[in-house]
Image: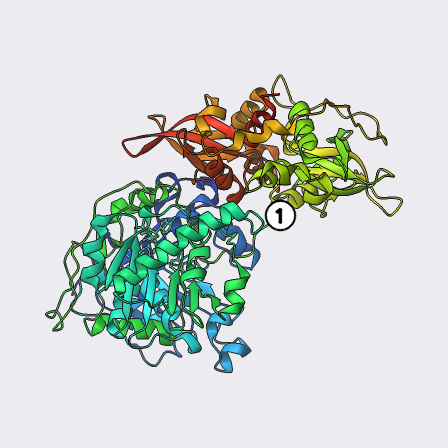
Amino acid sequence: MTELKELYPVGEQPPLGYVPPKMYAWLVRPERFGEPMKAWQVEEIDTPEPADDEVLVYVMAAGVNYNNVWAGLGIPVDVIGARNKAGEPERFHIGGSDASGIVYKVGKDVTHLKVGDEVVIHCGAWSRDDPWVKAGEDPMYSSTFRIWGYETNWGSFAQFTKVQAHQCLPRPQHLTWEQAAAYMLVGATAYRMLYGWAEHALRQDDIVLIWGGAGGLGSMAIQIVKAAGGKAIAVVSEDDKFDYCMNLGAVGCINRKNFDHWGMLPHWKDTVGYNQWLKGVRSFGKAIWDVLGERKSPRIVFEHPGETTIPTSIFVCDTGGTVVICAGTTGYNATVDLRYLWMRQKRLQGSHFANDDQAKGFNDLVLAGKADPCMSRAFTWDELPYSHQLMYENKHPFGNMAILIGAPDFGLGKNIPEPAGLTTIEPTAEIRERDGFYRAPLHPVDEVKVKEPAAEDTRLVREMMHYGVIASSTATPVDEVAQRMSEYGVHAIVVVDAEGYAVGVVSQTDVVLARQGRSLEELSRLTAGAIMSQHVVSCTPETTISDAVTLMTRNRIHRLVVADTRSGRPWPVGVLSMTDIITYGMRTAPIGASSMSLPPSALATDIYEPMVPEPSLADLGFLEDSTLVSDVMHHGVVTSLRNASVMDAAKQMLEYGIHAVVVVGDDGHAVGVVSQTDVVLARQGRTVEQAATLSVGDIMTPSLVSCTADRKLSEAITLMTRNRVHRLVVVEDKAGKLMPVGILSMTDVIRQFFSRN
Ligand code: NAP
């Protein structure tokens, strides 16, 4: 008889049914939150005991998902702290939300599993005692729903995992252990997206547009559509992914790099920009028809990129069709032209993971050989942090990845031949850096509030604002408004009535858009009152700084009008800008030797309205199409390395009087941008010490709103208005890498407005 051990080396399987009291596990602890290579460490811990409705599974292989990059970082939520708050004592997290393995112990209420069963595990966990679940409703709507191995502890990155019995499904015997561990999270998610929404459940002959066809979710979606007799059209970013998607069963592919209308919608008032966008999206729609060989639109659009693609998805979706979405990988503020949504009665449907039936639905497709796990690369036990580090750095191969846990070698566990007609997919293990890619955590648990020094919570706008505003009346001609902006270096002018109360705001964008698409004669008749926004985003001097910051970020602006409202109407007394907040808000004392901001002074009640020279309307002709970005831009860019501290970036902004810093890689190519807003938000809800530990890479926006110097100025303006930004990074494309060479700002555009005076 073999001697039973207290702890087994990784790769040595204990006798079936014997659960050693100790096990090895890859753990995250709060004191080492950070990049995967630092956060994840092997420790020896007590093997957990399954509850009555649970089983203990000896893990053979685990899947890799981005959630456990987030868990290791401890952002946006500290999953350990959240669980401790909910009463769980463990001060560690064992991740892993995909697995294949063997049942070693069953809880007393488990009837459909026995020791020795080989299983794959889906990551949907919920309380069987929840009345909603008991009533037979979809447990995905239960408030007790949790993602196992992210929101719950005891995931698959350990010799044993503790799961609810209903999470286990039969393991396909024609797959290796690592292949079997790679597909369930993405496969079941794709299955619910395509079958979970009754009116729009996938049908034979349906046309389905699939974003990221060569990615984890997309590769599963193509196979599900093919199995249903539908027509999957895959969108990818390189032609060399076409074959991969076609082998999976796509009827055609589109390279999204052939189009450039991505991102938020142009404002509907921006007729020039909107028409350009329409041209772009129509040519994308035509590409769908070309693939199909007929003028038909997709009944289902399979979405996850989010912010950059939603406007297109809604537009190309068929009348009465659906856009179903499970992530916002490129950002969450998707814009929708509601006219298409209501007139053509389309649906925008959110979807999240899957219930037992849907996980089984997908597993049945794999068992029948109708879906391949598309495993691109498998890693050894020791490489677990490395596999996540690759993901963290956006350098992981496309498709799905897995890690050997209990399986002693690659390629084991394949016990029967593949089913007839199986789609076999060659792995695509090549590593490519992905630009502009942001991963949302699957399902953030409630944020644990970081304790803030009470004194800072109470800081008020009046302590940091500038006193005095640049104003105009409703009758002031637009060109004069523009001249004032340029002269005083402000980005917006408050419009006041005869008594001095604020009635609107004219921004630089309003002025530039007033010129776009208008003749000079038309422009000469425009006044501030005609182009102003009547909605003055304002606060009072007594508003707290954190409320003021939220007001700005919600409205995508960098400064607020501060108004005295004691009389019941807004009397503008000053302005609070992001620069002011960085100057006075990052520390208790200002950071940086110089600052753009004036020190706070006594409350002023008068409006600062300087006299300006009369501009000539005849000079407005510069915005002809022949003007190029290179004619107007500033040369030179202030840059920062990814690992620089947030405090350094804040200092750079103040020293150079700029609103954003371009983040560059080692060879100088642009990898992202950190704006004043990013810096201010990094400080919100954190202590100064916590904010100081963040690096530029942690808070940057990885997508860069940029253009080349040879672009037409009018196109660059539209790019700014669509992305709600006031400046563009001007880049040179060097062998596919974007090297920053300058900046084009709305201020430059307005200055150019008057440069021929
Ligand atoms: P993935 O394997 O990295 O694939 C994502 C694909 O998106 C990439 O292959 C890429 O393809 C495409 N893409 C990237 N940037 C794009 C852009 N700007 N526009 C259009 N397409 C773009 O990731 P995944 O496993 O499929 O997961 C995708 C997202 O879904 C992630 O955010 C993930 O966290 C989330 N997710 C959510 C759930 C849920 O239950 N809610 C479940 C699983 C995954 P090309 O570059 O070739 O176009």
Q: Quadrant of residue 601?
A: top right
Percent coordinates x, y for residue 235 in the rendering? 31, 55
Give neighbour class at mark 1: few <14, some 14-19, many 20+ (Cα, 10 Å).
few
Residue 502 appears left or right of 640: right
- Residue positioned most to the left: 417
Q: Secondary structure at mark 1?
A: helix
Up the image or down, 406 lies above or below 722; here it is below
Residue toward you, 347 or 672: 347
Ligand 1 placement by image quarter: bottom left
Q: In the rendered image, is residue 151 in sight?
A: yes
Q: Quadrant of residue 667?
A: top left
Residue toward you, 419 or 315: 315
Q: Residue at x 33, y 61 (%)?
A: 210
Q: Amino acid at mark 1?
A: Arg
Percent coordinates x, y for residue 58 in the rendering? 28, 63
Q: Residue at x 36, y 26 (%)?
A: 668
Residue 420 appears left or right of 127: left
Percent coordinates x, y for residue 393 in the rendering? 35, 40
Which residue in the structure is indicated by mark 1? 554
